[in-house]
Amino acid sequence: MRHLQTSLLLIMLMLLGCNAWAEKADREKPINLEADTVTVNDAKKTSTYSGNVILTQGTLEIHADKLIVREDKEGFQHSTSTGNPTTFKQKLEGKSEYMTGSSQRIEYDGHMDKVQLYTKAWVKRGEDIIHGDYIMYDANAEYAEVIGGGSQAGSPATPGGRVRAVIQPKNKPAANASSK
């Protein structure tokens, strides 16, 4: 039972660490996890949550068919969530908007603080959205990469399998305010 509680805490840390814009208060909230089954392997330092997995903590919400968490030799946490699709949603710090995303597989590397979304991936922040077959964000390097998958990876959002982004214009000052 102690390892299960530790695993839940580690899930929280790895998922929240991947989003620098996330609601900071979420880190202080309890983790609620639901799944049809949970398997803990202390020898391999892995925990597997299967069947309609729902993880919530404050404004963070993750839905997956399966979530696997493992700890490496240095104590860093890594996770893989899979689903058709697996999704996340979290409120942005100091704003009334959310960051949401979806793909067939989401991997988080706690050592590198890197998130990767694979297959039919999209991430939306406010009204801005990006689609691709692969989306990666490296929080340490503050670097992102989005790759299309070609015509074989086409979806209704990206029929040709190319990367597609919709970026809203920044709010412009009113016309009469700029003339003053």
Image (spheres, grey):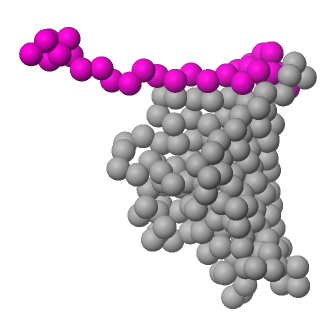
Magenta region, main secondary structure: loop
Can residue 79 be seen here? The reply is yes
Q: Is residue 93 left or right of residue 177?
A: right
Q: Is residue 95 magenta?
A: no
User: From the viewer's perspective, is 58 left or right of 15?
Assistant: left
Residue 2 position by quadrant = bottom right
Q: Nearer the viewer, residue 24 or 86?
A: 24
Residue 164 drawn at (x, y percent): 67, 22
> Image quadrant for the C terminus?
top left
| Above or below for 30 versus 60 | below
Query: Which residue: 52% across, 24% down?
Result: 167
Tell me residue 14's x, y (percent): 64, 65
Q: Residue at x 80, y 64 (%)?
A: 68
Residue located at (70% from left, 44% from top): 136
Q: Give the position of the N terminus as an image quadrant.
A: bottom right
Q: Image quadrant of residue 48?
A: bottom right
Magenta span of residues: 153-180
Name the one closer to the observer, 161 or 144.
144
Q: Nearer the viewer, residue 65 or 26?
A: 26
The quarter of the picture where residue 33 lies is: bottom right
Answer left or right for 5 relative to 180: right
Give how far across and how far down residue 8 sits, in percent.
Answer: 65, 73
| Residue for point 79% across, 71% down | 70
> Total number of numbered labels?
0
Q: Residue furthest left?
A: 180
- Image vertical order of residue 17 relative to residue 127, above or below: below
Q: Specify whether residue 53 is in view.
A: no
Magenta segment: does it hold 179?
A: yes
Image position of 180 with respect to 139: above or below: above
Q: Position of residue 78 (x, y in %)?
A: 75, 65
Q: Would you place residue 3 above or below residue 83 in this image?
A: below
